[in-house]
Image: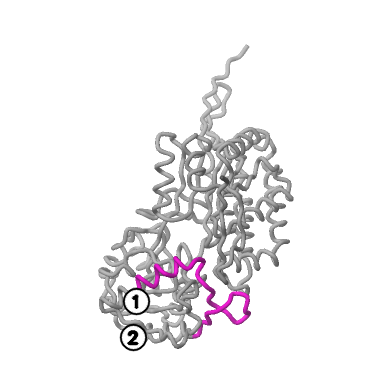
Amino acid sequence: MTKMIQCISPVDGRVYAERPALSPQAAATAAARAKAAQPAWAALPLDERIARVKAGVAALNAMTDPIVEELAWQMGRPVRYGGEFGGVNERTDYMAKIAAEALAPMVVESSDRFERRIERAPQGVVFIIAPWNYPYLTSINTIVPALIAGNSVMLKHASQTIVVGERLAQAFHAGGVPEDVFQNVVLDHAGTEALIAARSFGFINFTGSVAGGAAIERAAAGTFTALGLELGGKDPGYVMEDADVDWAVDVLMDGAMYNAGQCCCGIERIYVHETHFDDFVGKAVAWVNNLTLGNPFDASTTLGPMANARFAQTVREQTAEAIAAGAKPLIEKQNFPQDDGGAYLMPQILVNVDHSMRVMREESFGPVVGIMPVKNDDEALQLMNDSPYGLTASLWTSDPERALDLGRRIETGTVFLNRADYLDPAICWTGCKDTGRGGSLSALGYHAVTRPRSYHLRKVKA
């Protein structure tokens, strides 16, 4: 019996889309087609591959209106925020601009006796397992450099955003990327793991949960397939005594609440120097109380439902446990009557929290944040590092040197100063600890989707 993969809309609980999962034979055939098509794609001039990839992204931009509506239905993002095209375009343009330099050979010697060089060779077939929270942006991070570098790509999107993969395939095919070179596939977990175990891919990029990353590693065990894994996060913000409090509140609370808190690098815990604690908390509460929870198709809605009711339930459980253990909630339910106990979840700020509470230790991935006072940098550093995760850390001070010194001691992938929740395509997006391994974007993003190939050529005169 064919397994159906369903997207249950958080807007009203309906089955918004469903697609049949590929059979094992059909999945293996798709992977074989991708492998067979890759050499001809890689043989195209670099400028030609770039032109086709950029044409595909342009075709995607032309679908803005239906895509924005589809995103609201699939994962609940309010239509007022549009799609993800600003970031998609910025990242595409930057990765295209640096491609020639990033992929250029490293020439060690070019003489009448020897040619010694290192080139970047495509991995072959790149398999992307994409998440639902930023379904276009996270996909583009790997799709664009993978195709430009000469790989073929197979994309498996999350069931929650199953239509996104179809839109991406439609766009890239319209731009001139051959159908076998870019394939959108619908797979269940067993089908995914079988393809990985069968050595179908040269590189696998997965964005998702720690448990999902562990499953990918188990499936790939013994295959020596290169992996890039962006997993969980519990990103901290630290507001120092010389920070601009108003600016810190605005950015950190947006980082905690935007997209219903469902951001890979969303702010989930905040440490504030004790001299600013009361001021920061008061302004944070006022900021959150200005949000409007509701139907994402309503133009006034600034906070939509979470992507799935079970995700919201996890946040509710963490919050309730913290309150039972002594945490104080500062947002009144009466201000958010739209909270229905399901996917529509009110935002929350908690104080009187500590690291014995799951809400300060485990990933929440929802619109809740705990705020703690600290006495100094050492205390803040200890708390920031007291986490199994390490994606980003956001520091707030008028002293860049102080931030740089502190940042070097934080166990994280990216250090922000006076900003948060942003991916700069010129800087490698990476993490440490349970956040995963590898990196995307920047010149290093090209290293992930290619492998070094060395040439040691001794020239012999006839």
Would residue 209 appear left or right of 450 to someone viewing this image? left
In the depicted structure, whether residue 203 falls above or below residue 281: above
Image quarter in which the C terminus is found:
top right
| Residue tagged 2 | 278
Of circles 1 and 2, the one toward us is 1
Disc 1 secondary structure class = strand
Report the front residue among 181 and 215. Answer: 215
**Coloring scheme used:** one colour
Identify the mark at residue 208; answer none if there is no mark: none
Residue drawn at the location 60% of the way across and 34% of the way down: 32
Tell me which secondary structure the magenta stretch mostly adopts.
loop
Query: Magenta residues?
Result: 290-319
Q: Residue 73 colored magenta?
A: no
Q: Residue 316 colored magenta?
A: yes
In the depicted structure, whether residue 268 falls above or below residue 232: below
Report the front residue among 455 and 50. Answer: 50
Report the front residue among 318 and 45. Answer: 318
Disc 2 secondary structure class = helix
Q: At which x and y percent is residue 275?
A: 30, 83
Q: Residues within 10 Å of mark 2 (few under 14, many from 20)?
A: few
Residue drawn at the location 58% of the way across and 77% of the way down: 295
Q: At which x and y percent is residue 82?
A: 63, 70
How many labels sit on residues? Answer: 2
| Residue tagged 1 | 371
Name the kind of residue labelled 2 in the image. Answer: Asp
Image quarter in which the N terminus is found:
top right
- Give the CA separation, mark 1 to mark 2: 10 Å
Would residue 66 appear left or right of 389 to someone viewing this image? right
Q: At which x and y percent is residue 284?
A: 42, 82
Name the kind of residue labelled 1 in the image. Answer: Ile
In the depicted structure, whether residue 136 falls above or below residue 248: above
